[in-house]
């Protein structure tokens, strides 16, 4: 099944597409008038020139690209970033340089992945007690090494 998402592309880049038949996300590209430098430990907001209209009940998640993270220490700072179905502004991506080297982003460079996912709305019921589970209150590292 394919979900139709309305898209406005104000960039000079191609429309996002899946790299392979079973890819979960599409690569988003930087839409820049000039190269953007990210110094070590610096964060920047990178425009994509893309605007989307998601159907109700869906969100878009912005995730890092593994190659940029491994090779250059570049990642999405608020990963995953969430784009709500009622957002109509330009998709912009917060990147951070976790390496010790400067990194230059060029127009058209693939900077992140976007995954569109269905989500559920919840209602909360105030209670005095929760049903016990095998895990209980075990948190970070409770099953072994972190």
Image (spheres, rainbow, N blue to C red):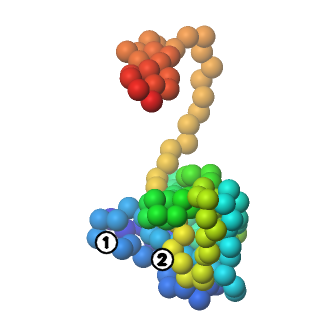
Q: CA distance from mark 2 to mark 1?
A: 12 Å
Left or right of 87, for residue 76: left
The answer to whether residue 75 of the structure is visible from this angle is: yes
Residue in the image at 38% along x and 23% along y: 144
Residue occupying the point 60% across, 56% down: 98
Q: Quadrant of the C terminus?
A: top left
Write the residue at 38% across / 72% down.
18
Q: Nearer the viewer, residue 52 or 68?
A: 68
In this view, the residue farthest toward the left is 21
Which quadrant of the view contains residue 30?
bottom right
SS category of the residue bearing label 1: loop
60 shown above or below 142: below
Q: Quick check: can you spot residue 81?
A: no
Res 16 label: 2
Q: At which x and y percent is residue 65? A: 47, 63
- Vertical order, 50 against 80 (above or below): below
Kindly identify the residue that appears in the image at 44 percent across and 20 percent down. 142
Q: Residue tagged by mark 1?
A: 20
Q: Position of residue 126 (x, y in %)?
A: 63, 20
Q: Which mark is residue 70?
A: none
């Amino acid at each position: 099944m394919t979900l139709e998402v309305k898209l406005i592309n104000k960039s000079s880049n191609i429309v996002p597409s899946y790299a392979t038949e079973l890819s979960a996300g599409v690569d988003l590209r930087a839409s820049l008038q000039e190269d953007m430098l990210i110094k070590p430990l610096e964060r920047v907001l990178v425009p994509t020139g893309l605007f989307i209209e998601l159907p109700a009940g869906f969100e878009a998640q912005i995730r890092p690209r593994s190659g940029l993270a491994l090779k250059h220490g570049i990642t999405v700072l608020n990963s995953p970033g969430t784009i709500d179905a009622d957002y109509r502004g330009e998709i912009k991506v917060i990147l951070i340089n976790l390496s010790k080297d400067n990194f230059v982003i060029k127009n058209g460079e693939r900077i992140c992945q976007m995954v569109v996912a269905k989500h559920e709305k919840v209602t909360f019921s105030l209670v005095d007690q929760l049903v016990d589970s095998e895990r209980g209150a075990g948190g970070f590292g409770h099953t072994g090494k972190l």
